[in-house]
Image: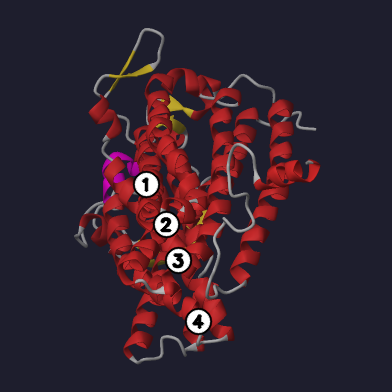
Amino acid sequence: MFEGWDAVVLARAQFAFTMSFHIVFPAFSIGLASYLAVLEALWLATGREVYINLFNYWLKIFAVAFGMGVVSGIVMSYQFGTNWSAFADKTGPVIGPMMAYEVLTAFFLEAGFLGVMLFGLERVGPRLHFVATLMVAIGTLISAFWILSANSWMQTPTGHAVNADGQFVAADWLKVIFNPSFPYRLVHMVLAAYLTTSLVVGGVGAWHLLRDQHLAGPRVMFSMAMWMATLVAPIQILAGDQHGLNTLEHQPAKVMAMEGHFQSHKDGAPLILFGWPDQREAKVKYAIEVPKLSSLILKHSLDAPLAGLDTVPRENWPPVPITFWSFRVMVGLGFLILGLGLFSLLMRWRGMMYQSQLLHRFAVLMGPAGFIAVLAGWITTETGRQPFTVYGLLRTTDSASPLAAPAVGSSLIAFIIVYFAVFTAGVIYILRLMAQPPHPGEQGPTKDLPARAAGITPAAGAAVEGVR
């Protein structure tokens, strides 16, 4: 079926497919874990029942999303050994330890406290339970730290040497971990996770307020979510700008593709708002542009020169069309999120926060926007790095396993079938949970579970009594 196909292209498609499914769950669980910690802290500080009701409501959703994130993440590691064995061999001495550090720190912390967080509120008491919630939230952030450090090293490799076998080995672990792009990526991704969660929480709250604007739980969650969007969206735009300047310094070809600059500009480069990049002809067709604005954004000067892809060997060009458009999707959604936050601030000032149906409908429509923006951002990051897996040092074609196209294609089809079956069911279940508003006395995942985790359960004890 796949005879004549390129095995590397299929392997890249498989990794892109599985990564696209995976990344949305960590982006949601990172933000939701922190939100749960805030809700429980507010409950402990104020004693208001609405906070514990919201905690239990979102805890059930977190449990499902966290589980799907773990399952989809395991698959990513296996692909390094199946489709990308050459990459694993050459980068293993650097990437492998960082993956292990994530397991030893983040995974162990999350695994140690997740059960207490999910099922232990009535067993260990509120204060110890809050510690468990806090540890899970910290664990998700530590996980992001190590994963983004590893990915950032692939983007801006430093602190390494190459041994006699052609493998990358760490010469300075601090330079490997804290490579030039890592701080910018970490801040940008964590803020994206918080915004993604705030949009989901705000969208769910708005959905229920459209039905009944007097519900206490949706009012609180909607207000908290809109504060997050209002405060964090402008910070994220600033962080994204700084990340872009860092990328211009270390990965200029990626920025050229993002901007659609096939040609160099000696006296100020235009900002191309829209157009159709034609990589074969090396130009952007039907371009709508603002003169010299790109130079102002990237160099803070209208007349600053900017190099184009004509200064880069064509074999080192990233795929410009997808990088160009994914970047615009991400930026466009970022400004829409800012608009939602500002609109909510206006309605809050006017005292119409819970009555404005226009605001509520806007928030519902923006509910999935964070996921789309995260996907667009990762597509920009990863396609812009091409044709390298380790930027400038290891090409993608030299990283793949020596597999025939039919072998890779058949596993890709299997992944598509299984992923759509499993994760569609999971997403539908989450949406069903969200469709019901939180109510007084909201129960967490502990409801209808056995009272003991080991030993003789009450059911077994009752059976013994029956025999007697």
Asked if one can make out residue 467 in the rendered structure from this viewpoint, the answer is: yes
Asked if one can make out residue 260 in the rendered structure from this viewpoint, the answer is: no
| Most frequent secondary structure within the magenta stretch | helix
Rendering coords of residue 142 (x, y %) = 36, 42
Count of marks overlaid on the render: 4
Rendering coords of residue 291 (x, y %) = 31, 66
Residue wearing tag 4 = 360
- Give the mark nearest the N terminus, 4 or 2: 2
Residue wearing tag 1 = 135
Taking the view exactly as shown, the residue that stands out farthest to the top is 164
In this rendering, would 441 be left or right of 147? Answer: right
The answer to which image quadrant residue 127 occupies is: bottom left
Magenta stretch holds residue 247? yes
Nearer the observer: mark 1 or 3; the answer is: 1
Which label was assigned to residue 333?
A: 3
Magenta residues (range): 245-252
